[in-house]
Image (spheres, grey):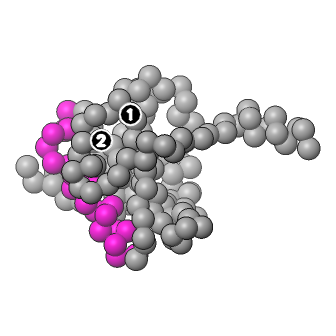
């Protein structure tokens, strides 16, 4: 299969949002997706809050990886991989691995000491893939989220 991994362009954000929704639907959380094409365009291209790479197969976006910089008090600047998504019908073609390697290269090129991401404990294939590339799954760390309702509740207490 002939494909290109490249930096996303503003006009790719429609396809990126489709991929985000496809993943959310797969995980039964489609109703939780609030981000819009306009949000992606503004935050990615106007504000520079993230970098997105896409897998372009014959002019169609079949996968994406969205990353941004974070700062670790232990390591300094790191790269966070927010999502790596490949369309369901394209899984197993090597696109996911190619996007993943692009993220690793991006982190290396920017001199970070760590690339981090979250993987669902039920995604055994991804866990095995990541471990085979030298990544370590941190079993003792828990992901914590405070959603908008919790944020408002805390602000109201002040």
Q: Quadrant of the C terminus?
A: top right
**2 or 130, which is in the foreground?**
130
Rendered residue at 35%/29% (across/down)? 122
Q: Are marks 1 and 2 in contact (CB under 8 Å)?
A: yes
When asked about the image quadrant of residue 115, the answer is bottom left
- For numbered disc 2, what is the local secondary structure? helix
Rendered residue at 49%/43% (across/down)? 140
Q: Is residue 139 left or right of residue 142?
A: left
State which region is magenta.
89-110
Residue 127 in the image: state x and y as whole percent.
Answer: 30, 41
Q: Residue furthest right?
A: 158
Rendered residue at 40%/75% (across/down)? 110
Density class for disc 2 (Cα within 10 Å; few <14, some 14-19, many ≥20) is some
User: In 3D space, how far apart are the residues under numbered discs 1 and 2 (Cα atoms)?
Assistant: 8 Å
**20 or 99, which is in the foreground?**
99
Q: Is residue 92 left or right of residue 41?
A: left
User: Mark 2 sits on what residue?
Assistant: 127
Q: Is residue 109 magenta?
A: yes
Density class for disc 1 (Cα within 10 Å; few <14, some 14-19, many ≥20) is few
Residue 156 in the image: state x and y as whole percent.
Answer: 88, 38
Residue 117 in the image: state x and y as whole percent.
Answer: 43, 50
Q: Is residue 35 above or below residue 71?
A: above
Q: Is residue 51 visible?
A: no
The disc at residue 121 is 1
- For numbered disc 1, what is the local secondary structure? loop
Q: Residue furthest left?
A: 1
Q: Residue furthest top?
A: 28
Q: Is residue 109 left or right of residue 42?
A: left
């Amino acid at each position: 299969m002939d494909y290109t991994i490249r930096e996303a362009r503003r006009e790719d954000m429609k396809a990126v949002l489709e991929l985000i929704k496809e993943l959310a639907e797969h995980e039964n959380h489609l109703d939780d997706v609030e981000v819009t094409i306009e949000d992606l365009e503004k935050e990615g291209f106007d504000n520079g809050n993230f970098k997105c790479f896409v897998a372009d197969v014959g002019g169609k976006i079949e996968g994406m990886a969205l990353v941004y910089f974070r700062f670790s008090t232990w390591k300094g600047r790191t790269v966070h991989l927010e999502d790596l998504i490949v369309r369901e019908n394209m899984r197993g073609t090597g696109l996911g691995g190619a996007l993943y390697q692009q993220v690793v290269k991006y982190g290396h090129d920017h001199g970070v000491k760590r690339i981090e991401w979250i993987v669902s404990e039920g995604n055994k294939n991804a866990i095995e893939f990541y471990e085979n590339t030298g990544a370590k799954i941190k079993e003792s760390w828990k992901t914590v989220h405070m959603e908008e309702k919790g944020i408002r509740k805390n602000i109201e207490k002040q």
